[in-house]
Image (cartoon, rainbow, N blue to C red):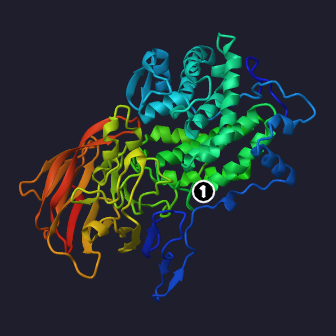
Amino acid sequence: MKPDPLILDKVTAEPAPAQPALPLPRSRKEPLIRAVAEARHDDEVEPIEAARALVPDDFARRGGLFDAALGWAYRLGVPGALLAAPLRKPAKLRMLATVATPLDGDRTRGKAIRAGYFLVEGLKLPLAEADFAASARLPMPQQKLLHGFSWLRDLAAAAPRETAALNAEMLTARWLDVHGEIAKGPAWSVERASERLRAWLVHAPLVLSGENPAMRPRMLRAIEQTARWLDRHVGSEQDRLAAVSGWIAIVAAGLLLPDGRPRRIFGETGLLKALGELVSEDGGVLSRSPLGQMQAIAALVDLEACYTAAERTSPPALKAMLALLVPPLLALRHGDGGLGSWQGAGATSAHTLARLIAASGVRTRPARDTRHWGYQVVAAGKSILQFDAAPPPRSRDARFGCASTLAFELSHGVSRVVVNCGGAELAGGATPARIEQGLRGTSAHSTLTLDDANSTAVLLGGQIGKGVEAVDVARSASGPGARKTTRLEASQDGYATRYALIHRRILMLSADGLELRGEDVLEPSGKRGKRGKVGFAIRFHLGVGIQAGLSADKRGAGLALPDGSYWQMRLGGDIADAELAIEESLWVDGDGRPHGTPQLVIEGLASRGGGRFPWLLKRMG
């Protein structure tokens, strides 16, 4: 790779087998309540090793004693220049290499900056109105954009460096005018500071090669200052993904700034430990968010590019982690190639996902088993069924935890038939921030609610409270040869304390994917059911462009899909005290834009002693 003469001093340096009930604990880091067992023909069971999250030992650093001592001394506060070269003056502050990340930005967003405005999750924000002040109370998407400098990647994709550098210099100077000295506020969380430092390092040509000669030394001081701040504060971050982001930025600074070896060793040690705490055994992040999964992959892709630029070999664990993170993400794709709407994520488009996977360099198939991540996926014919069969994430793992247990999504071909609203993490752009908490509630997902209450408490600040503690899930297949029907059955205890009822859901998808039979069952949680009745609603949020019409008896509905196909929903004949209705809903796409959609709602009264509510969703013709 040739050095950049403007800014750089290059250095040489198939369906799963039938399983009995499997209770999943709320944290992927805790042992399973019971071991997974496979049923044999003689009714004996064979225990399988209990699932666990990866622990730090799985990604522990394997270095020599000298490296260990160097990292230990740096952690105690010994200056990196003194440790790297104790017999000479500290090296001049400069960038040592140009990073060529394979992960491109969004050209549309980059062109918007050239045109004079930011695109913030579907909302236009004029550059002149962007508020970089520490006291500004900004929605989360604007915080990420303005203080995390994610716009640099988009700008780099939209124009040549000479042209883009003018915009980058102007906007960066405005930010430095406010945050030239270390300050408190949303810009100085570990997450925002690490995102900003990584963006500055990876896209250094944009922020160091403008027309103002005074900008270069100012920018270099800001880079070193932010790296030192992260050295001291990275351990204070409770969010696991933010901690990984912080360690990645520290390692990148150690690779690309002079006298960086002690910082790099210090950062690698912390990073490998944090990666071991980030994911479950099958590679799913503990937040259970597809968006969080994508953010972890993107950060590791940038870090690998930093190692390449510095002509160093990255620790093998980093490539191993990338190979672990990609397959679960691929498993949550629908027929249109985009992701499902789970745990605050919007429906990420196929193009965005494909760009990320290509940049990762990982060539693999979707994971066949993501039960430890909490999702059951069934592919049949042209249909894909995704089922949330786990408790919500713990508060320490979640950013926008959702009470979505036992919700499902169904797609057929490129059409999404049943969806969740999604998009809580994107609220604050085109999707109003005031509905963020509602988007995380049980009613925003295609599942059953009792008395309009969430199955798990949804708290402010993206946190999750008490509710579902354990989920029993079983998967089986029945029928001859290629005509096997896949059956998923799971139960959750989120309503047990308040209503003394357990919610059990059974989903059966036919082999051709054209028929989904479901049954929602309420069972007493104690030996005796309570007297009286409680209101219930079973919601089916429908995909964009679907036209729904209600039958005369209010026990069925017809669905006309954009692809021209026609589906029908019917209630089971023995459902009493319930009717089917069509109500308004919304669905948030991967760019944060809300779309008005209909939803089918089975609503009525259920006995406190329990009840069964069967339904059928089938393609006609």
Query: Is 201 drawn above or below residue 270 in the view shown?
Result: above
Secondary-structure class at tag 1 = loop
* Nearer the observer, 343 or 37: 343
Residue 189, percent from left and from top: 55, 38
The amino acid at mark 1 is: Glu
Residue 184, percent from left and from top: 55, 32
Residue at the extreme bottom of the image, as rendered: 42
Q: Which residue is mark 1?
A: 277
Query: Is 181 drawn above or below residue 402 in the view shown?
Result: above
* Residue positioned 67% across, 48% down in the render: 271
Occupied quadrant, residue 74: top right
Q: Would residue 616 appear left or right of 213 to someone viewing this image?
A: left
* Residue positioned 57% across, 66% down in the render: 52
* Residue positioned 80% across, 37% down in the render: 80
Would residue 304 be seen by someone viewing this image from the given angle?
Answer: no
Residue 432, percent from left and from top: 32, 35
Q: Would residue 496 appear left or right of 161 to someone viewing this image?
A: left
Q: Quadrant of the N terminus?
A: top right
* Residue positioned 45% across, 52% down in the render: 332
Query: Is 309 drawn above or below residue 530 in the view shown?
Result: above
Residue at the extreme right of the image, as rendered: 87
Q: Quadrant of the C terminus?
A: bottom left
